[in-house]
Image (cartoon, coloured by chain):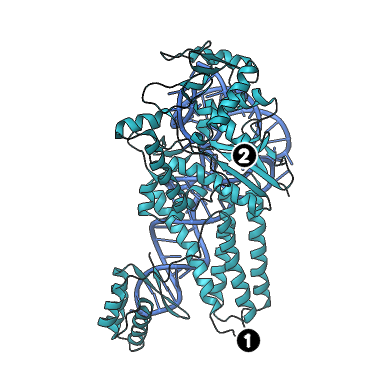
RNA sequence: GGCGACGUGGCCAAGUGGCAAGGCAGGGGCCUGCAAAGCCCUUAUCCCCGGUUCGAAUCCGGGCGUCGCCUCCA
C-alpha cells in the first residue's frame, strides 16, 4: 500500500514516489536562533519528526536535513539588545534549541548545517544566478530578479501583477523591481560579514535553504517541509533561486504544517499569548505536549491552552496505565482454564486490526489522530479483556504481552514513550515514611515502598482502615498513587 | 482588496458519497472497606439555505461566521 501526502504545490494528495527507491530525502526549515523557540515552532518540528519516524518505520531510509539560521537581522537586533555579539546570541540559542528538541524527543537530523558555515556555497550560488541573468549586483547588495523567473508564484498561488499592488521598497534598498528579494546584503557597520565578490556582506535569509538542501540532498529531492507561514515568500523564493540556477525541479513534495493558535488567535508577542516551549516542558512531561500535537492533523490549526494540555495528560495516562496493567498481567501465575480459545483469538485479531488501521491512517497524509484512535481502540479491548478474565492461561498472558508490545511500538512510531514509567523514581522521603509506619530499617527507596505496601496489606487484612489509609494518604502526599488490583497492590509515580 | 483553510456531541478532534472514529469532561451503575485504576450505560437534525444523487457531514451554488498568508515569522 502506498503512502499518500498532501502537496502544497499541487494542492492535492499524491502518492509518494521517491526520487530513489527506498530512500527519502527531506529538508525541514529550522529555527532562526535569536531566542527560545516557542510552541508553534515546536509543533512544526514535532510534526516533521513524526513524519520522518513513520517513513522510517515504513521501511524508508530517510535522509533528514534541518538547518540552523545563525545569521539574520533578528539575531543582530538581539545582540544589540543583550550587548553581546551576534555569534554569541546564535551560539546561546542554538544550544537552547538543541536541548529543548532533545527533551521533546525529536530525532536528530542526519545533517544540521549552520548558515554561517556554508557561506562559500551561498556565494557560489549567487554567482551562478548572476551569470544566468537571474540576479544583479547593486552597490554591494545582490538581488534576485523575480521577473526573470516565469514560474514565480506557483507554490503560493500568487500572481506577480497582484503582488505588485502591495509591494513596497524599504528605504535604503537598491532594487530594480519592488518584488526582487535580497540574495546578499552589503554589511553595515557592526554587523557580521564575510568577504565576497561584491564586497563584505552577509547572505539573505532565503539563500541558505537552497544551498544547503542541494549540498546535502541534491536537486529534486523528495520532501521539503516547514510551517505554513513559510509558503510565501520563503519557499517561493527558494524555488525561484534553485530552479533558476539548476533548471531542474527543486522539490517533489512540499509539506506545510498548520499554525498553532492560542485562544483561536495566532500566537504573538504583541497579543501577550506567546508561549515558549521551555515553559511548557517545565510543567508537563514532553509527551503530553507531543500527544496534544498529535491529536490534531498536522495541516490543521492547533488551538493550544492549558486546559488542552491537562486533557492530553489524562489521555496519555490512559495509555501508560493500560501498558502498566498489561505488564502486570505478565507476572501472574498462568491458570489452566484461562479466558478460553475464542476470547484469546479475538484479542490477537484486535492486535492485528490495530496495526492495520494505524498504518492505513498514517499512510493517508500522516493522520496521527486516526493512528492514535487505532491505539486507543486496542487499549480499550485490552482493558475489557483484563476486566472480564480474572484467570489467564499461559497463551492469554502471551497475547496480552503482544498487546502491550504493540501499543508501545505504535505509540513509539509517533515518538511517544508510554512504557517508560519511572517506577524507580521514588522520592527519598519514602524511607522516612517506611520507618515511621512500617518499621523499615534500611535506606533503599524501592524496599521502603515495598515495606509500606506490605504494612498496608496487613492492616487491610486486619480491617484496620485507619492505618491502611494513613499509608496510602502519606504516599499520595509524596506524589505516589496506590492502586489495588486483583493481583495485589502497587505504587505508581505521579497522578 | 487578493489568495487559502476551516465550521462535526459540553470541550477537542478523525472522517471527502452508503447506518457519525478516538480523547477529555459530566451523569448513572458495577467492582472496591473507602479510593485509585478498569468495565457497563448515557448525550450529534455534522453552521444555515438551496441543488445534484436511490443515498451527502462528505459533491455543487449561495449565505453567515472563524482563522491564516499577502511584511520578519514554524
Mark 1 nearby-residue class (10 Å; few <14, some 14–19, many ≥20): few
The answer as to whether the residues below labels 2 and 1 share one chain is yes
Q: Is residue B38 left or right of residue A482?
A: right
State the CA–CA distance, disc 2 to disc 1: 59 Å
Subunit of label 1:
A
Q: Nearer the viewer, residue B63 or A200?
A: A200
Mark 2 or mark 1, which has the lower sequence index?
A: 2
- Above or below, A42 against A272 in this view is below
Around disc 2, counting alpha carbons within 10 Å, would you say few (fewer than 14), some (14 to 19), or many (20 or more)?
Answer: some
- Please tell me in which quadrant of the rendered image residue A188 appears: top left
Q: Is residue B55 above or below residue A425?
A: above
Q: Residue furthest left?
A: A436
- Placement of the C terminus of chain A among the 4 image quadrants: bottom left
- Residue B30 x/y as whole percent: 45, 74
Q: Is residue B12 above or below residue A77?
A: below
Q: Is residue A448 rendered to the left or right of residue A13?
A: left
Residue B1 lies, in percent from the top left, at: 50, 16
Query: For the residues carrying marks 2 and 1, which lies nearer the camera in this image?
Result: 2
The chain coloured cyan in the image:
A
Q: Look at mark 1 in the image and give the residue it sits on.
A: A336
Q: Which chain is blue?
A: B
Q: Please say whether residue A190 is visible from this viewpoint.
A: yes
Q: Against A122, is A287 above or below?
A: below
Q: Residue A90: x, y in percent?
A: 41, 38
Find residue A216 and name its label: 2
Kindly give the residue lying farthest to the bottom in the view shown: A462
Between B7 and A408, the residue placed more toward the observer is: A408
Amino acid at each position: 500500500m502506498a503512502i499518500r501526502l498532501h502537496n502544497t504545490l499541487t494542492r492535492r494528495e499524491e502518492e509518494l514516489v521517491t526520487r530513489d527507491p527506498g530512500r527519502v530525502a527531506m529538508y525541514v526549515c529550522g529555527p532562526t536562533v535569536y531566542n527560545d523557540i516557542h510552541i508553534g515552532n515546536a509543533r512544526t518540528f514535532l510534526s516533521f519528526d513524526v513524519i520522518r519516524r513513520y517513513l522510517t518505520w515504513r521501511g524508508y531510509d530517510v535522509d533528514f536535513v534541518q538547518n540552523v539560521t545563525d545569521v539574520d537581522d533578528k539575531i543582530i537586533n538581539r545582540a544589540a539588545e543583550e550587548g553581546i555579539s551576534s555569534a554569541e546570541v546564535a551560539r546561546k540559542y542554538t544550544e537552547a534549541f538543541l536541548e529543548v528538541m532533545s527533551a521533546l524527543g525529536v530525532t536528530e537530523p542526519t545533517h544540521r548545517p549552520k548558515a554561517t558555515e556554508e557561506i562559500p556555497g551561498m556565494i557560489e550560488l549567487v554567482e551562478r544566478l548572476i551569470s544566468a541573468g537571474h540576479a544583479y549586483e547593486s552597490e554591494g547588495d545582490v538581488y534576485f530578479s523575480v521577473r526573470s523567473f516565469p514560474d514565480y508564484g506557483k507554490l503560493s498561488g500568487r500572481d506577480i501583477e497582484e503582488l505588485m499592488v502591495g509591494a513596497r521598497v524599504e528605504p535604503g534598498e537598491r532594487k530594480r523591481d519592488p518584488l526582487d528579494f535580497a540574495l546578499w546584503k552589503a554589511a553595515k557597520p557592526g554587523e557580521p560579514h564575510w568577504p565576497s565578490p561584491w564586497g563584505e556582506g552577509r547572505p539573505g535569509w532565503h539563500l541558505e535553504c537552497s544551498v544547503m538542501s542541494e549540498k546535502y540532498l541534491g536537486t529534486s529531492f523528495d520532501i521539503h517541509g516547514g510551517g505554513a507561514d513559510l509558503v510565501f515568500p520563503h519557499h517561493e523564493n527558494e524555488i525561484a533561486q534553485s530552479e533558476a540556477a539548476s533548471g531542474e525541479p527543486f522539490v517533489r513534495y512540499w509539506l506545510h504544517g498548520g499554525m498553532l493558535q492560542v485562544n483561536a488567535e495566532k500566537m504573538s508577542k504583541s497579543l501577550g499569548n506567546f508561549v515558549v516551549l521551555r515553559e511548557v516542558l517545565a510543567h508537563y512531561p514532553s509527551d503530553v505536549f507531543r500527544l496534544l500535537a498529535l491529536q490534531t492533523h498536522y495541516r490543521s490549526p492547533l488551538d493550544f491552552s492549558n486546559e488542552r494540555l491537562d486533557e492530553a495528560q489524562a489521555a496519555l495516562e490512559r495509555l501508560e496505565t493500560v501498558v502498566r496493567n498489561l505488564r502486570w498481567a505478565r507476572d501472574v501465575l498462568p491458570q489452566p482454564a484461562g479466558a478460553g480459545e475464542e476470547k484469546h483469538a479475538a484479542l490477537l485479531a484486535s492486535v492485528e486490526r490495530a496495526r492495520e488501521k494505524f498504518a492505513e491512517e498514517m499512510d493517508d497524509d500522516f493522520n496521527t489522530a486516526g493512528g492514535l484512535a487505532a491505539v486507543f481502540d486496542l487499549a480499550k479491548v485490552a482493558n475489557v479483556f483484563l476486566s472480564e478474565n480474572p484467570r489467564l492461561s499461559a497463551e492469554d498472558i502471551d497475547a496480552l504481552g503482544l498487546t502491550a508490545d504493540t501499543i508501545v511500538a505504535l505509540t513509539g512510531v509517533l515518538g511517544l514513550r508510554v512504557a517508560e514509567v519511572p517506577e524507580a523514581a521514588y522520592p527519598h522521603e519514602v524511607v522516612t515514611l517506611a520507618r515511621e509506619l512500617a518499621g523499615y530499617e534500611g535506606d533503599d527507596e524501592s524496599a521502603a515502598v515495598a515495606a509500606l505496601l506490605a504494612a498496608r496489606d496487613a492492616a487491610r487484612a486486619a480491617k484496620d482502615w485507619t492505618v491502611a489509609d494513613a499509608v496510602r494518604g502519606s504516599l499520595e502526599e509524596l506524589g505516589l498513587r496506590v492502586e489495588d488490583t486483583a493481583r495485589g497492590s502497587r505504587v505508581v509515580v505521579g497522578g
